Image (tube, grey):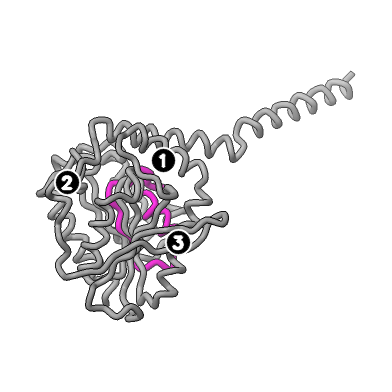
């Protein structure tokens, strides 16, 4: 009787294990996570639109050259981004470089402009495309693109890995990352991918912040975080947890939370634009990059 009962218990445990494994298999978890990420960004951008404004045409501080470039391949297709550099720089001249990661709207005109502004500060700036050439014009389209992209994080990582290798092949003296919104989260992910190789990471209101000290402990690069006090993705509380986690493992991040600023406050082509906060954040960003990529 005891022996038979033992077999029954073992069978029940096996069935339970199968059920749990099925429920939490990696593909299911990835799909669920991508939906959550997309929904959170949707809520952050509910009343936002990527509307071109006069502010988006801010010129870089020096003349730059920019254009499309293939920086790698994925599943037989070219990875095409936007590369900008100072016009007076020789094409093979070693320069500090930046991986520029777009918002949830995609690699649109605003990101190309920002890439040129960064190039005007003396960098070789490569705006990657994590959406395979697609660009959103409204929140519903952007949500679908985010959900599709984040359902396959390994593909996004490979995209960014190839961007890093491409900049190395272009004689970059140092390499940093910068991103906004969806791209802010992936700027942090790029740092986690290259914990002792990336030379600086800038995160503008990236909602998917890592707050586990163990995961952050490997990071060796300086980190700049720019956030809004009115944002809920991430909330100021989550930002503080992120900062505390970094400090608990001996890091010294530069974290700024702007009062009266919401998610996407630095996007001059969006309806959340806060020119005062954006200007101050830009000044802090260029000073940070100057310190860590040019010296």
Mark nearest the camera among 3 and 2 is 2
* Magenta highlight range: 185-212
* Image location (x, y in percent) of residue 98: 33, 65
Q: Is residue 127 visible?
A: yes
**In the image, which disc is placed on residue 258?**
2
Residue occupied by mark 1: 146
The one of 98 and 132 positioned closer to us in this rendering:
132
Q: Contact, CB < 8 Å: mark 1 with mark 2?
A: no
* 66 sits to left or right of 72: left
- The residue sitting at 38% across, 57% down in the picture is 128
Q: Is residue 88 magenta?
A: no
- Helix, strand or loop at label 2? It is strand
User: Could you tell me how far apart the alpha carbons at marks 3 and 2 are, in whole angstroms?
Assistant: 28 Å
* 125 sits to left or right of 287: right
Q: Contact, CB < 8 Å: mark 1 with mark 3?
A: no
* 287 sits to left or right of 11: left
**Earlier residue among tags 1 and 3:** 1
Residue occupied by mark 3: 218
- Helix, strand or loop at label 3? It is loop
């Amino acid at each position: 009787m005891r022996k038979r009962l033992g077999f029954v218990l073992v069978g029940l445990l096996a069935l339970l294990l199968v059920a749990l494994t099925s429920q939490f298999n990696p593909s299911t978890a990835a799909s669920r996570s991508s939906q959550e990420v997309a929904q959170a960004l949707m809520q952050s951008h509910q009343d936002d639109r990527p509307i071109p404004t006069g502010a988006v045409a801010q010129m870089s501080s020096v003349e730059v050259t920019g254009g499309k470039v293939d920086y790698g391949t994925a599943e037989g297709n070219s990875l095409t981004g936007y590369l900008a550099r100072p016009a007076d720089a020789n094409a093979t001249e070693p320069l500090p470089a930046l991986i520029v990661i777009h918002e949830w709207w995609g690699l649109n005109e605003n990101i190309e402009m920002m890439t040129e502004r960064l190039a005007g500060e003396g960098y070789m700036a490569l705006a990657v495309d994590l959406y395979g050439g697609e660009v959103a014009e409204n929140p519903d389209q952007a949500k679908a693109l985010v959900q599709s992209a984040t359902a396959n994080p390994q593909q996004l990582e490979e995209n960014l890995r190839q961007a890093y290798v491409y900049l190395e092949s272009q004689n970059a003296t140092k390499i940093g990352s910068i991103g906004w919104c969806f791209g802010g989260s992936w700027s942090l992910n790029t740092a986690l991918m290259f914990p002792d190789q990336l030379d600086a990471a800038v995160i503008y209101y990236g909602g998917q912040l890592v707050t586990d000290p163990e995961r952050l402990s490997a990071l060796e690069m300086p980190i700049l975080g720019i956030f809004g006090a009115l944002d809920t993705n991430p909330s100021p509380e989550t930002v503080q947890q992120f900062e505390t986690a970094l400090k608990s493992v001996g890091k010294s991040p530069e974290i700024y939370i702007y009062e009266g600023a919401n998610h996407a406050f630095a996007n001059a082509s969006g309806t959340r634009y806060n020119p005062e906060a954006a200007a101050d954040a830009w000044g802090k960003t260029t000073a940070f990059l100057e310190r860590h990529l040019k010296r």
